[in-house]
Image: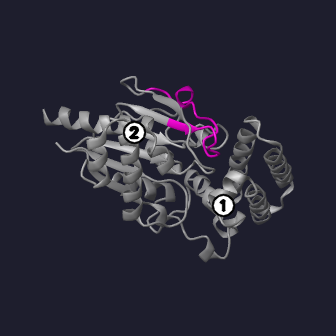
């Protein structure tokens, strides 16, 4: 039986699913070759190694720019959660003992964030949080990476995390935003065959929750740049509680980079309970080149990440074809 490979993306602007799938496959092919899997790397680059899908859900987030700004789509609870998320990011970077220039930027952002406690209403709070993001854009790693053109765009993208976890924004049928996103992901999963799932950033949260509703075998779940371990923002808001490895998952590898500002608490095995078969996440550090290391392709191009993915797909096809 041919195994499936499903990519689950994270925060960000609208994207072309086919182009993204090809970019993730190209990065995975690079990592596979580094890991000694040359034949598999060539097959991956040609999308011929496994049936691969890019589970796109970004269109379910309303275009904030079209709404005239950030405030119309964020209530006080979501704004408060975004404040906590930014605080986690700032504190995590200060803990890495950055050089003097970066430390001053982070300390300035921390002072601005403290001032948000006096905000009057959600609109005022959001404006202040945008100012914090604008300050953070002065950090070399963010500025040179070119990920965000403005503090408002950065805040809007980060707010996708808090909007998902708010369990709100129901549609005409009463289905909340997070429910619509999980339904989208589950539509890419087939109960009848093994599926390796690779999830990035917010996608790791979405995949974790979605897989609790999946009955097909998942030989390996790989999470990269995951915010799951954010104890004040993400971890207590996960469903179900306490956070537990989905029963369908047979192995879970979690990768983090020290310079990844979205993954400040990487040791998920300390915060997630095992499933019925005793499966827990296993976290490992990677070191990527460049100023902005949070992208999925940076992780997938690592031999330590790509190697286990290729091996899991090969083993699954052998096992389920026997």
Is the C terminus in the top left, top right, bottom left or bottom right quadrant? top left
Whole-Å distance between the Cαs marked 1 and 2?
A: 33 Å
Residue identified by numbered label 2 = 34
Which secondary structure dominates the residues rendered in magenta? loop
Q: Nearer the viewer, residue 241 or 106?
A: 106
x and y percentages locating residue 104 in the rendered image? 84, 47
Mark 2, Cα crowd under 10 Å, few <14 / some 14-19 / many 20+, is some
Secondary element under disc 1, as helix, strand or loop, is helix
Q: Is residue 208 visible?
A: yes
Q: Which of 150 and 242 is in front in this view?
A: 150
First along the sequence among labels 1 and 2 = 2
Magenta-drawn stretch contains 263 = yes
Q: Which of 214 and 281 is in front in this view?
A: 281
Q: Can residue 213 be seen in this view?
A: no
Name the residue at 37% across, 25% down: 276
Secondary element under disc 2, as helix, strand or loop, is helix
Is the N terminus in the top left, top right, bottom left or bottom right quadrant? top left
x and y percentages locating residue 231 in the rendered image? 64, 37
| Residue 90 found in image quarter | top right
x and y percentages locating residue 316 in the rendered image? 24, 35
| Residue 11 found in image quarter | bottom right
- Mark 1 and mark 2 residues within 8 Å of each other at the beta carbon: no
Q: In this view, does 135 lie to the left or right of 54?
A: right
x and y percentages locating residue 250 in the rendered image? 34, 31
| Residue 79 found in image quarter | bottom right
Name the residue at 36% across, 41% down: 32
Q: In this view, does 252 lie to the left or right of 47?
A: right
Tally the numbered discs: 2
Which residues are drawn in magenta? Answer: 255-274
Residue identified by numbered label 1 = 154
Q: Is residue 46 left or right of residue 95?
A: left
């Amino acid at each position: 039986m041919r195994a499936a490979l499903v990519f689950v993306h994270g925060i960000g602007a609208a994207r072309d699913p086919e182009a993204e799938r090809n970019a993730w496959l190209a990065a995975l092919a690079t990592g596979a070759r580094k890991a000694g899997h040359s034949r598999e790397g060539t097959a991956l680059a040609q999308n011929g190694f496994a049936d691969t899908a890019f589970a796109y859900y970004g269109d379910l987030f309303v275009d904030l720019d079209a709404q005239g700004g950030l405030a119309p789509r964020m209530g006080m609870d979501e704004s408060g959660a975004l404040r906590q998320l930014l605080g986690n990011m700032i504190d995590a970077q200060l803990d890495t003992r950055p050089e003097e220039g970066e430390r001053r930027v982070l300390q300035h952002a921390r002072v601005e964030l403290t001032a948000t406690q006096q905000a009057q209403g959600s609109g005022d709070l959001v404006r202040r949080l945008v100012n914090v993001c604008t300050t953070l854009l002065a950090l070399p790693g963010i500025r040179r990476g070119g990920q965000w053109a403005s503090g408002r765009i950065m805040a809007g993208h980060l707010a996708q995390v808090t909007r998902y976890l708010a369990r709100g924004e129901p549609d005409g049928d009463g289905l909340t935003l997070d429910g619509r996103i999980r339904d989208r992901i589950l539509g890419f999963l087939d109960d009848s065959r093994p599926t390796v799932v690779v999830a990035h950033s917010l996608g790791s949260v979405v995949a974790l929750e979605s897989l609790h509703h999946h009955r097909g075998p998942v030989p390996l779940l790989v999470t990269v740049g995951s915010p799951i371990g954010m104890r004040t923002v993400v971890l207590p808001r996960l469903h179900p509680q306490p956070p537990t490895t989905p029963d369908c998952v047979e192995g879970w590898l979690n990768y983090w980079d020290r310079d990844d500002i979205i993954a400040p608490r990487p040791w998920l095995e300390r915060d997630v309970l095992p499933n019925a078969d005793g499966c827990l996440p296993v976290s490992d550090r990677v070191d990527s080149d460049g100023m902005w290391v949070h992208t999925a392709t940076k992780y997938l191009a690592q031999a330590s990440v790509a190697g286990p993915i290729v091996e899991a797909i090969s083993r699954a096809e052998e096992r389920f074809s026997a």
